[in-house]
Amino acid sequence: MTVIVQKYGGSSVADLDRIRGVAQMVASARRQGHDMSVVVSAMGKTTDDLLGMARSLSSTPPRRELDMLLSTGERITMALLAIALHEMGIESISLTGSQSGIITNDQHTDARVIEVRPFRVQDEMARGKVVIVGGFQGVSYRRDVTTLGRGGSDTTAVALAAALGAERCEIYSDVDGIYTADPAVVASACHLPEISYQEMQEMSMAGAKVLASQAVEFAKNAGIAIYARSTFKPGRETVVRIMPPGRPRGVRAVVSERDVIRVRIRGKCAADRLAEVLDIFNQARIPLKELSATTLSGNVPWSRASFVISRTNLHNWSRVLPVLEERTGDEVEIDEGLSAVSLIGEGINNDSSTLAATLDFLGGLSIPVLGVATTSFRISCLVPGAFTEEAIRACHERWIDQTIPEPDVP
């Protein structure tokens, strides 16, 4: 029999009635003859509620204890879903991330999956059971409970699908796939029936919340197609897969990441300061993005350096910031309240025309661009948070709706 892995997000299992509805969907797929593993998130806003309780006791709760606390949300959901399936006559069993063989590094609250040993899952499936797995969690090589950060249940599902050699991985949420922009911000946002792994991964890394970037990375490496679907509105989906050659290139989507922080280092001792600052962030286990450094002369290496950090999973900024200010003084500048607005698409940086045109029309709209970063599939503009939605709509109109006239670019 073919193996299918399904994942249901928090809105899909927000209450008991929705859990019963998910159980009916799982039962229908099982009765079609598929071997099934189902990954679930915590119910509704459970994770936010648990995090709120922790922060009511401490502004900077220990990351290890946060993982112990937050991992309980998925355990509640997986047990309730297994109970609902039993009531429908479907044999099932619930397993934690640890019991399912999800092995991670020891980066608490933002762990990465390093290996999946699905032996228990395979044994239970061989007995004819639907295996319900708590998403978002694993176990480190030190045998501590870990959580996988934002979108971690997606990662659990795709990593498990890869380890099981699944035919596909179906991700169910409250949206029916991927759009060219957030429909809540851009009314003309278009549904994308399919998208490449590379484009989807760039979207996720740039702030899109539909799929986690680590999940897309696992799918790409294993060649497993991801089907992003709505739990509540069946019939439409986005398939994330290898795309055939020869399709049109250009901007496919506009996404944003809000409330990012930029750290800038200037001066003759920037090289030493950069090393010191990197050590501070490494000790605090805060990942960096868009790191850049420049050398203006052979005697003054790295006279300028900068990088960006995300507030996602940033639980200890209130402790890190005073240490940073004390050890670096006025040689390091912190810019908070920024947003990164990104254009995503294959071939958009084959030449400089897309970047030049974007800077031109954003400038014409008096939207400040405080920094730019690019990859093969992405152009990111750093803007003040107050301009986020205006910049998103302008970029979507220019590159996807194409309602803004073509600027003259020399």
Image (tube, rainbow, N blue to C red):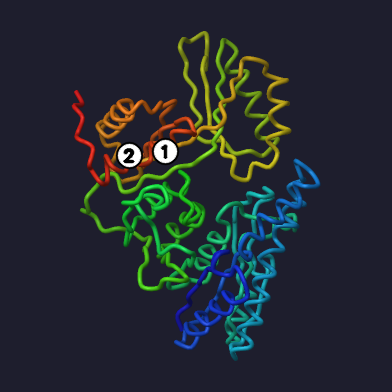
Q: Is residue 294 above or below residue 45?
A: above
Name the residue: 41% across, 66% down: 227
Q: Residue 395's mark? A: 2
Estimate how packed mark 1 is, as few (under 14), some (14 to 19) or many (20 or more) residues with alpha carbons within 10 Å: many
Q: Is residue 183 shown left or right of residue 231?
A: left
Q: Is residue 165 left or right of residue 405?
A: right
Q: Position of residue 129 (x, y in %)?
A: 60, 84
Q: Quadrant of the C terminus?
A: top left
Q: Residue at x 48, y 67 (%)?
A: 172
Q: Which mark is residue 316?
A: none
Asked whether disc 1 touches disc 2, contact meaning CB atoms under 8 Å apart, the reply is yes
Q: Which residue is mark 1?
A: 341
Mark 1–mark 2 distance (CA, rounded to whole Å): 9 Å
Residue 39: x and y in percent read 57, 69
User: Is residue 224 among the parts visible in the rendering?
Assistant: no
* Badge 1 or badge 2: first in the primary sequence: 1
Q: Would residue 181 appear left or right of 25 to someone viewing this image?
A: left
